[in-house]
Amino acid sequence: MSALHGLRILDLTRLLPGGFLTQLFADLGADVVKVEDTGAGDYLRWSQPTYDGPDDSARSAAFLWLNRGKRSIRVDLKQEQGRELLLELARGADVLVESFRPGVLDRLGLGWEVLAAANRRLVLCSISGYGQGAAVRERSGHDINYLALSGLSALTGAAGGPPAASAGQFADIGVALLGAFGVLAALRERDVSGVGQHVDVSLFDASLLWLGLLVAKQLCDGEPVRRGVTERAVCYRLYACADGHVALAALEPKFWQAFCRGVQREDLFAHQWDAEGSEAHAALARLFATRTRAQWQAFASEHDCCLEPVLELDEALASPLARDRGILATLEQPGVERAIRQLASPFRLSRTPPRAKGPAPGLGEHTREILAALGRTKEAIEMLEQTGAIAGPHPQGARGSFLS
């Protein structure tokens, strides 16, 4: 049995944050029902690149990764019958995750008070840019905006140079992890109280968490932290080598001394914290340039000193470490001829390991199945389709409007 077997989650989110949050639960065995609109559904369904296949709503590489093992139902929440269906689904669910702008669910008549009245055990997780109670809660934004506002972008890049955009989606992934932890905490408390609660997580909050140590420093000594702070010491920085770069992180004296002994430069013991531009920095730059990444990696294996090569993404995915950790999963998607490789679940559980329950769903693929499980007859389902309150599997190339 899987770790979260029997847990039912309604996923009203789009794009990366909510998709990753609920994917974590799906891989651990939860039944995740992706509630999409009767138009184009999740924006990620139509993002590039895509795999070849007959269903253009389930070919996007990004969508296939984030939504494996989920089921999809199409409901028009702007219609009364659609809202009634969502409340019926919520009565049988443990968790509802949404990422609309704050206030959208309330305007639809599906706010927290309404959901809690329908199911007092329900846990609602709301993902938003700035938080449910923020004065700017309705401002639009994406990952790079939240990183900019949190100070993370300003601190990324070389000292004296311009700020740099991050290659990773730190706000998106961070808020997903916060939300997942918050949901599990609320479910644990529900085991005692029998009552659910509202979990409010924001991408702005998640962005600041990555800077926790620097925040602690600034609040303690009062000195503003500026770009290049992580490169001030010669013992902790990236160095160019003969064929690329390496990362030295010899913070503890034992690691720094092991490095210095290994390169026969014990005279540098006292210069561990010398700044960029110092004589020690210049000496190390010259030293690192004399060997390749592979040679420095062999050196690190002999001298335990926190030294590793800077790998490109393709190199990282093909590395022995990646193979040892099983970081890639191979899945089959209906209609796609070649096997799909993607990141596997990051969890390692000894008795109930995570596993992908199946492929990502086509848009509205499970609408009729889910409604039949609610007791709807074939005729009743057809009537709802005729009114537009729901939609079944999408026609080829379907597009439509979105809630915002």
Image (cartoon, rainbow, N blue to C red):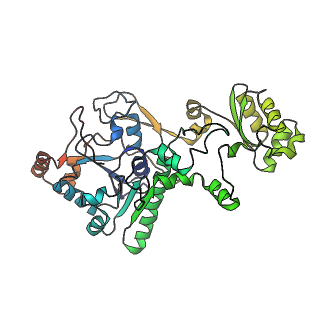
> Residue 80, image x and y in percent?
17, 56
Q: Is residue 33 left or right of residue 369?
A: right
- Snapshot quadrant of residue 264: top right
Q: Residue at x 50, y 51 (%)?
A: 174
> In this orientation, which residue lies closer to the viewer: 229 or 346?
229
Q: Residue at 27% x, 69% y: name it.
A: 117
User: In front: 131, or 241?
Assistant: 131
Residue 43, given in percent of the width and then of the height, sits at: 33, 40
Q: Does residue 389 appear to the left or right of 205 in the view shown? A: left
Res 115 → quadrant: bottom left
Q: Quadrant of the N terminus?
A: bottom left
Q: Specify the quadrant of the image occupied by residue 121.
A: bottom left
Q: Give the camera-side residue of 351 and 253.
A: 253
**165 to 214, vertically: above or below:** above
Horizontal and vertical percent position of residue 238:
70, 37
Q: Which residue is the extreme one toward the bottom?
A: 193
Residue 372 versus residue 241 in the image, above or below: below
Q: Which residue is at the far right?
A: 267
Left or right of 214? Residue 175 is left
Q: Who's the residue at 26% across and 58% down the image? A: 107
The answer to whether any part of residue 346 appears in the image is no
Q: Name the residue at 28% across, 29% down.
A: 54
Which of the pair 341/231 is nearer the observer?
231
